[in-house]
Amino acid sequence: MMLLRGRVMSCGMCGVVRGVRASLSTSTTSITPQVCIIGSGPAGFYAAQHILKNHKTARVDMYERLPVPFGLVRYGVAPDHPEVKNCINTFTQTAAKDRFTFLGNVAVGSDVTLAQLREAYHAAVLAYGAAKDRTLDIPGESLPNVISARRLVGWYNGLPEDANLDVDLGIESVAVIGQGNVAIDVARILLTPVDLLRSVSLCSKTDIPEPVLSRLSESRVHHVSLVGRRGPQHAAFTIKELREMVNLPGCRPHLHPPDYTHLRDLIPELPRPRKRLLELLAKTALDKPDAKLSAAYASATRTWGLCFLRSPVEVMAGPAGEVTGLKLALNRLEGEMGQERAVHTSEMETTECGLVLRSIGYKGVSLDPSLPFDPRTGTIANEDSRVKGHQGLYVSGWIGTGPVGVILSTMTSGFSAGKAVVADIDSGRLDVSHSRDGQECIRDLLVKKGVDVVSFDDWNILERHEESEGMRLGKPREKVTSITSMLDIMHH
Ligand code: FAD
Ligand code: NAP
């Protein structure tokens, strides 16, 4: 990288006059394409990886709202599934590339606007995930112990904004609305014996923060029911997660056999992954468990259940405003096989519970009014990752696809966004004939605003701190859950 002698430019945003950055390739000079990525989850890191690997000179700057990287890999993936987080190793290798910079603790939309980034960079990749969740819009939804699964997940994963979540676990029965993998995750964490989450005997498996473990150890929860608006054949969770529930220590399934008898007729017609899932469901509900499971179930003190063709229409409260139960509409299914919709009948029933967890999907938000954002789906309209009507703007991951898909599918989306950026630079579709200032100009703006920008080295300092605290406690890490403390540790 060198400064082209004699060529200077002044930045329209901060007025600073700088030399033009350029890169040398053999005997000719060319402008360095400046790319920014917004969000440091899998969508951001996989897009960065693709761009850095497939373009020889492009620089990638990654802006992240939190002082720490990795999005839902750190703050969503269940703490008892640490192997899923191995992708962090690949992300860390990407972060070590010399054409990559991490700018943490910078919220795009408030600390810096999308328009400012677009002026400073040739291309911007929106990879900021789905920050909110869908709501039920029913009476009682704002009662104290009605909480989104998203926030409970944030709480047990140490997300700063949820570190002090007001959840009362001094109740016996929990209703989770929704039957996806997030619903299963929260049910499993609430039902797993806390000593297993601590796993002292197994050299500690989870990094659940100590204050959360302490609250879980006092939990009185002994039944969790997952409420689905459609039938068992429509359950959105996957077989590995169901198998874990079936085998969960200290816990047994409490399933209503008549809900499952029709499944065995359906199974032969289904594609393989679905077939295996429903076979396990039917077996668990209808067959006698083997001797080992029978013995485990006999001593179980906690239960989980699935309830189908039910939609909550009201959360009921007692005199002190405490959650006492759910009023459910009984549904029938309408529509073609495979695309059935749940329709309420006039029949209602009530079920008792003291905590309601809404797990009906995450939802993306708009960062800027100029974006072609669909508030219904929470996504930005795009074609092959290119944002419609906005040259040089791309989407990657959940903000483009919607809040579905595992890390592997997000990787495909990230690579697709990276591929679009590189193809557009190479084909000239993206104008890189004039140099852009990239992070230098943005850093000036952020300094003026008093934003404490965090680097990947700063994150490494925090990571080492968390690991050494974890070692003291016999666990992989003890997460720091306050942003102020994170910044203190990074800078001192
Ligand atoms: P995210 O991971 O959410 O990353 C978005 C990033 O953008 C975040 O770091 C966020 O802080 C940042 N950001 C947001 N707004 C701004 C802003 N204004 N400015 C700057 N930065 C911003 N998949 C699996 O394969 N296995 C699992 O076990 C698994 N478990 C999951 C558990 C849960 C609870 C959830 C919700 C998902 C799980 N997934 C799992 C799916 C996986 O997490 C997603 O596929 C993936 O994280 C989506 O990546 P993303 O980068 O689009 O979004
Ligand atoms: P999801 O898989 O889309 O499940 C959402 C659930 O909510 C479905 O059962 C859906 O039922 C239900 N639902 C939606 N709107 C509803 C409403 N208005 N009323 C009642 N129920 C409603 O979403 P998720 O569980 O949030 O997971 C998000 C993604 O992350 C998924 O792709 C998931 O696989 C992935 N993930 C993976 C893992 C893992 O691999 N272990 C763990 C967690 C998450 P309908 O089918 O009727 O719409």
Image (tube, rainbow, N blue to C red):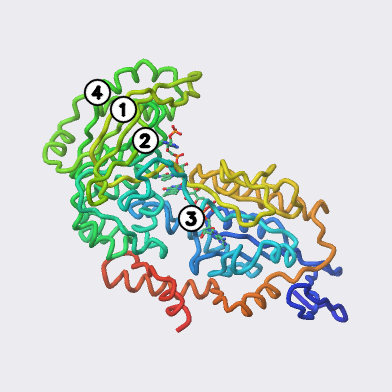
In the rendered view of the protein, which quadrant contains the N terminus? bottom right
Q: Which residue is mark 3?
A: 87
Q: Tell me which numbered mark, 1 or 2, is placed earlier along the sequence.
A: 2
The x, y position of residue 46, in whole percent, is 58, 54
Q: Tell me which numbered mark, 4 or 1, is placed earlier along the sequence.
A: 4
Q: Amino acid at mark 3?
A: Cys
- Of circles 2 and 4, the one toward us is 2
- Of circles 3 and 1, the one toward us is 1
Give the residue drawn at x 69%, y 55%: 54
Q: Which residue is mark 1?
A: 348
Q: Nearer the viewer, residue 491 or 461?
A: 491
Give the residue drawn at x 35%, y 44%: 140
- Of circles 3 and 2, the one toward us is 2
Specify whether 164 is left or right of 407.
left
The x, y position of residue 313, in whole percent, is 37, 35
Q: Which quadrant of the structure image shows residue 347? A: top left
Circle 1/circle 2 CB separation < 8 Å: yes
Task: Find the distance from the CA under tag 3 to the CA under tag 1.
Answer: 46 Å
The x, y position of residue 125, in whole percent, is 65, 56
Give the residue drawn at x 68%, y 44%: 382
Query: How many other residues sit within 10 Å of disc 2, few (<14), some (14-19) or many (≥20)?
Result: some
Give the residue drawn at x 33%, y 35%: 227
Q: Which residue is mark 4?
A: 257
Q: Nearer the viewer, residue 207 or 221?
A: 221
- Of circles 4 and 3, the one toward us is 4
Q: Tell me which numbered mark, 3 or 1, is placed earlier along the sequence.
A: 3
Q: Nearer the viewer, residue 170 or 489?
A: 170
Give SS at disc 3: helix
Q: Which residue is mark 2?
A: 313
